[in-house]
Amino acid sequence: MTTETPPRSTTTDALWNSRFLRACRREPVDATPVWLMRQAGRYMAEYRSLRSRVSFLELCKSPELAAETTVFAAEVLGVDAAILFADILLILEPLGFHLEFPKGDGPVIHDPIREADDVGRLRPLEDVGALGFVYEAVGKIRAGLPGTVPLIGFAGAPFTLACYLIEGGGSRNYQRAKTFMYSNPGAWNDLMTVLVDSTAGYLNAQVAAGAQAVQVFDSWVGSLGPDDYRRFVLPHMRRLFQMIDPTVPRIHFGADTGSLLELQRDAGGDVIGLDWRVELDRSWERLGPDVGVQGNLDPIVLFAPRDEIARQARRILDQAAGRPGHIFNLGHGILPTTPVDNVRALVEMVHEFSAR
Ligand code: CP3
């Protein structure tokens, strides 16, 4: 990301000067920007009502409904950025895998990668048009959002996607994925290379369609120790960040990565996402002054009494101490039974407590 770059075609002056994009560039802001991972979802009655009529995949593949869902959540919450309604796993379909979200269960990837030879089944996403419904949704969201609210595009990181492709779904220990990685380093590199190329094309197409920033979700990378991250993930993440359009801020999020923060920073990103298991001030010191930080309230705190929510929001803002480059968020996504009123109250508190 370059501070000097003039606003791009989809980034008007009003967007360029928004709190969120200013914070991404580590410029001073009038109040700390806040948005929340999974801000559109089952904790909202309107979302549940929509989902009673259409399946999750139908919703993701309808640009109209995906756009409505994104814009509605951003409006109701009064957040400083919207995030595209989609899923990190959508890219696996054009790569050649059959994806399903069974009712009440986690996602399933049918016929997963089990042997080194299976990597050959992966079709590189050269034709980014394969996910045209996502880019169409981005255009509709941009048209539906106020001219001051930036839109964040996103994708899954190659390690997290590889875990899904090899495990065939969620996992506790990532035993299959990690065994594959240790046993077939060559095939692992080939797999990660295809995922990086495809993900970079996917993210850049979202930017071209109207996203003002992107977030890369490496949700499961915290299952690796530092040496494994260095060997099996870092070179690929570095290449991914080098390939993403440098005119938009890139947020690099991982969960449970307290032992990997410096390595994640070295891999790339203008803003590093922190979960609640680390202290924001101490982590920012470790990361150094050249990146912003996003986070890091425990999503479970949103189930607590208001005074506890306020206490913890203040603590995080105190740890950021008004330094340019903090974006308030949760340490991971909002849980499905979270009280909506507490979410709205949190957004108000962040703005009120941080007003300069
Ligand atoms: O943040 C947002 O509001 C944007 C939408 C968004 C979704 N998924 C919608 C969704 C985003 C950014 C994601 C990312 C995602 N998806 C991640 C990375 C973030 C993280 O939590 O670490 C991961 C690991 C996935 C994969 C995924 N998708 C799982 C494991 C599940 C099932 C678990 C669950 O929470 O239901 C999904 C389904 C999913 N993705 C839902 C939503 C709103 C729920 C679907 C439904 O039943 O309506």
Image: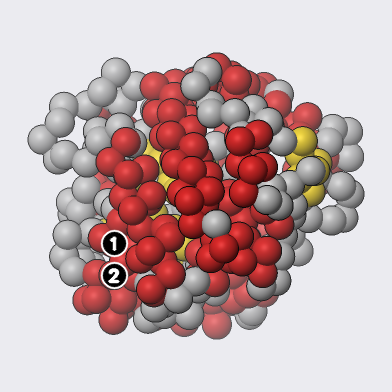
Q: Amino acid at mark 1?
A: Arg
> x, y percentage for residue 93?
68, 32
| 32 lies above or below 283 | above
Q: Residue at x 28, y 81 (%)?
A: 282
Query: SS for tag 2?
Result: helix
Q: Residue at x 53, y 26 (%)?
A: 125
Query: Which of the pair 91/77 is nearer the observer?
Result: 91
Query: SS for tag 1?
Result: helix
Query: Which of the pair 137/177 is nearer the observer?
Result: 177
Is the Cβ of the residue at disc 2 closer than 8 Å to that at disc 1?
Answer: yes
Callout 1 environment at 10 Å: few (<14), some (14 to 19), or many (20+)?
many
Please state, as top left, top right, bottom left or bottom right, where the C terminus lies in the image: bottom left
| 285 lies above or below 192 | below
> x, y percentage for residue 121?
65, 34
Q: Does the beta carbon of the residue at mark 2 sit less than 8 Å from ligand 1?
A: no
Residue at the disc numbered 1: 265
User: How many numbered circles does the render carry?
Assistant: 2
Residue at the disc numbered 2: 262
Callout 2 environment at 10 Å: few (<14), some (14 to 19), or many (20+)?
some
Measured in 3D between alpha carbons, the distance from the residue under mark 2 to the one under mark 1, in whole angstroms, is 5 Å
Q: Residue at x 87, y 55 (%)?
A: 104
- Residue 350 appearing in the image: no
Q: Residue at x 37, y 39 (%)?
A: 213
Q: Amino acid at mark 2?
A: Glu
Please state, as top left, top right, bottom left or bottom right, where the N terminus lies in the image: top left
Looking at the image, residue 286 sits to the left or right of residue 329; the answer is: left
| 252 lies above or below 172 | above
Q: Which of the 4 quarters of the picture holds residue 2? A: top left
- Residue 11 appearing in the image: yes
> x, y percentage for residue 218?
50, 57
> x, y percentage for residue 32?
33, 59
Q: Going by the picture, which residue comes out furthest to the left?
A: 4
